[in-house]
Image: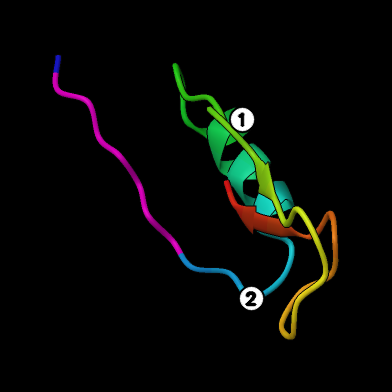
């Protein structure tokens, strides 16, 4: 069976959106959540960068 990789951009709540999508589609999962290691101009330490 073919597998798809979905890429969607969210300015906010990306982790919640990804978890909702994974719960909606069978055999889906959130593979990783990457957080900002430190503060920088557009994010604070611990902010979600990519999911």
Return the disc, 1 or 2, that comes first in the chain's sequence: 2
Q: Nearer the viewer, residue 29 or 34?
A: 34
> What crowding class fits label 1: few (fewer than 14 Cα within 10 Å), some (14-19), or many (20 or more)?
few
The residue positioned 37% from the left and 54% from the top of the image is 7
Q: Nearer the viewer, residue 30 or 21?
A: 30
Mark 1 vs mark 2, CA separation in Å: 21 Å
Colour style of the rendered protein structure = rainbow
Q: Residue furthest bottom?
A: 41
The residue positioned 60% from the left and 45% from the top of the image is 18
**Residue 42, image quadrant:** bottom right
Magenta segment, which residues?
A: 2-8
Using the image, tell me which numbered label, if any, was put on residue 11.
2
Q: Is residue 3 above or below residue 20?
A: above
Q: Is residue 15 above or below residue 19?
A: below
Q: Main secondary structure of the magenta part?
A: loop
Using the image, tell me which numbered label, if any, was put on residue 23.
1
SS under mark 2: loop
The residue positioned 73% from the left and 49% from the top of the image is 16
Q: Is residue 30 above or below residue 5?
A: above
Residue 4 horizontal side relative to residue 1, left or right: right
Q: Nearer the viewer, mark 1 or mark 2?
A: 2
**Residue 48, image quadrant:** bottom right
Counting from the top left corner in percent of width and height, residue 51 is at: 57, 46
SS under mark 1: helix
Counting from the top left corner in percent of width and height, residue 10 is at: 58, 69
Asked whether 51 falls inside the magenta stretch, the response is no
Using the image, tell me which numbered label, if any, was put on residue 45.
none
């Amino acid at each position: 069976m073919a597998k798809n990789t979905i890429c969607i951009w969210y300015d906010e709540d990306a982790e919640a959106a990804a978890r909702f999508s994974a719960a909606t589609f069978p055999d889906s999962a959130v593979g990783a959540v990457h957080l900002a290691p430190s503060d920088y101009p557009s994010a604070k330490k611990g902010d979600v960068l990519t999911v």
